[in-house]
Image (cartoon, grey):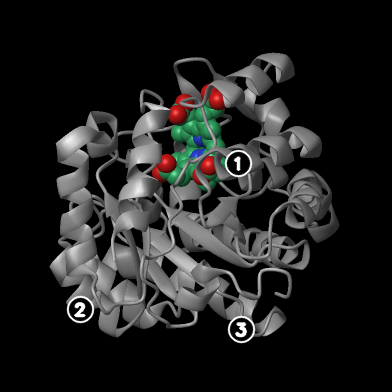
């Protein structure tokens, strides 16, 4: 954790209040940037970019060069873990990810060196980025959480109500727990290897943590995340971990903050900043939660939304981010406006 020793984001993850707060945006490298589109056209596909370290490193750095964010997040995808487990992944233009749906765990790869070999491009990309990023900025690794990855693996793609994974979990609790354990082992190994390759902190994306009964939230979101956090910390003492159980209920976020052991919790657009500051802020560092659509709007709406969040987060160790990923139609000038608004505030 040496090169980014004085990064503002790491100071906040260590419990300090920074004014103005550090800022980065989920999905900050992507289709809203013309320079990203240029690399993507040259590469031919999104997946090729993920699997080619030099290209992944290049697009990871693009939003830092343009906007001066406080953190770079390595360009990859949460679906590299199912890929490492032996499930082929393809991306269809305008459709999203496609996987071969699984009904049991028997054909999944359990061989750790095989996982490491399939995930190696991400580690190579991190090794290329760290020396090209200045010391004041943090480099983030990430992975999908077991529950969210299971929703894609059970369904064979995205879904609106996570039905296939829920049905598997309800009908065959032991088999589903075994699936979450296996995914969790691969995720933990992936996070540890990213920290070894130069990531200063990691984020766990549980994008489909919403809509679960409390018992299922505990078994499928909280427990598997806690297991990963424990495993990562055993291997990497003091590793900094951000969790994003997107759109969990207030009670769900509170349990997640208390039980999983993460250092920081990223909250979604609909979460009250006052509640997040007062309740979550007494347990963990808070990250969030500008509406990505307010960023598309820009102007006075954006300025108001930023002011509301900043005023709620006074005195709280806080990282400014969106409530969910940046949308492709976002004008890059609005992102510049956002960073200027934050840095002009005292
Ligand atoms: O944040 C970053 O900039 C780092 C890179 C990153 C990507 N995906 C790149 C990407 C990260 C952290 C992710 C996470 C991810 N991937 C999540 C969790 C976060 C979230 O938004 O809830 C999920 C659910 C995925 C799976 C995934 N990848 C989907 C559903 C899609 C297709 C949807 C779409 O927007 O087309 C992707 C593709 C993807 N991952 C793109 C990028 C930049 C778009 C690819 C392109 O067409 O160029």
Residue at horizontal 34%, vertical 76%? 257
Ranked by sequence position, the earlier of labels 1 and 3 is 1
Vertical comparison of 157 with 260: above or below: above
Q: Horizontal placement of 33 versus 339: left or right?
A: right
Q: Quadrant of the C terminus?
A: bottom left
- Residue at disc 1, secondary structure: helix
Q: Secondary structure at mark 3?
A: loop
The one of 180 and 130 positioned closer to us in this rendering: 130
- Tell me if mark 2 has few (under 14), some (14-19) or many (20+) residues whose alpha carbon lies within 10 angstroms of its own: some
- 30 up-or-down from 119: above or below: above
Separation of marks 1 and 3 at Cα, in angstroms:
29 Å
CA distance for labels 2 and 1: 35 Å
Residue 65 marker = 1
Where's residue 139, x and y in %?
A: 63, 59
- Can you say which quadrant of the picture contains the N terminus? bottom right
Mark 3 burial class by Cα count in 10 Å: few <14, some 14-19, many 20+:
few
Find the distance from the CA under tag 3 to the CA under tag 2: 24 Å
Identify residue for label 3.
Answer: 238
């Amino acid at each position: 954790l040496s090169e980014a020793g004085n990064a503002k984001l790491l100071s906040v993850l260590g419990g300090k209040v920074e004014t103005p707060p550090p800022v980065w945006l989920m999905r900050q490298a992507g289709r809203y940037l013309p320079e990203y589109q240029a690399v993507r056209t040259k590469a031919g596909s999104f997946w090729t970019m993920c699997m080619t370290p030099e290209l992944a490193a290049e697009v990871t750095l693009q939003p830092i060069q343009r906007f001066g964010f406080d953190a770079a997040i390595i360009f990859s995808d949460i679906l590299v873990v199912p890929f490492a487990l032996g499930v082929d992944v393809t991306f269809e233009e305008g459709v999203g990810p496609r996987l071969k749906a699984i009904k049991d765990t028997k054909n999944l790869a359990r061989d750790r060196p095989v996982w490491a070999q399939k995930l190696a491009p991400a580690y190579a990309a991190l090794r290329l980025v760290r020396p090209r990023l200045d010391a004041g900025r943090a480099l983030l690794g990430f992975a999908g959480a077991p529950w969210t990855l299971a929703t894609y693996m059970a369904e064979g793609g995205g879904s609106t109500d996570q039905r296939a994974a829920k049905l598997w979990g309800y009908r065959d609790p032991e088999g589903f727990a075994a699936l979450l354990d296996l995914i969790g082992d691969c995720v933990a190994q992936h996070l540890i290897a990213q920290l070894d390759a130069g990531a200063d902190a990691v984020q766990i994306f549980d994008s489909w943590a919403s809509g679960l009964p409390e018992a299922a939230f505990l078994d499928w979101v909280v427990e598997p995340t806690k297991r990963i956090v424990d495993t990562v910390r055993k291997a990497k003492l003091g590793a900094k971990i951000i969790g994003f159980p997107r759109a969990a209920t207030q009670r769900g976020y509170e349990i997640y903050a208390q039980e999983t052991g993460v250092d920081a919790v990223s909250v979604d657009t609909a979460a009250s900043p006052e509640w997040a500051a007062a309740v979550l802020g007494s347990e963990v560092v808070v990250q969030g939660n500008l509406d990505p659509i307010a960023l598309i709007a820009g102007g006075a709406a954006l300025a108001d939304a930023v002011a509301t969040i900043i005023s709620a987060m006074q005195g709280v160790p806080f990282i400014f981010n969106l409530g969910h990923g940046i949308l492709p139609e976002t004008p890059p000038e609005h992102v510049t406006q956002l960073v200027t608004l934050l840095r002009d505030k005292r």
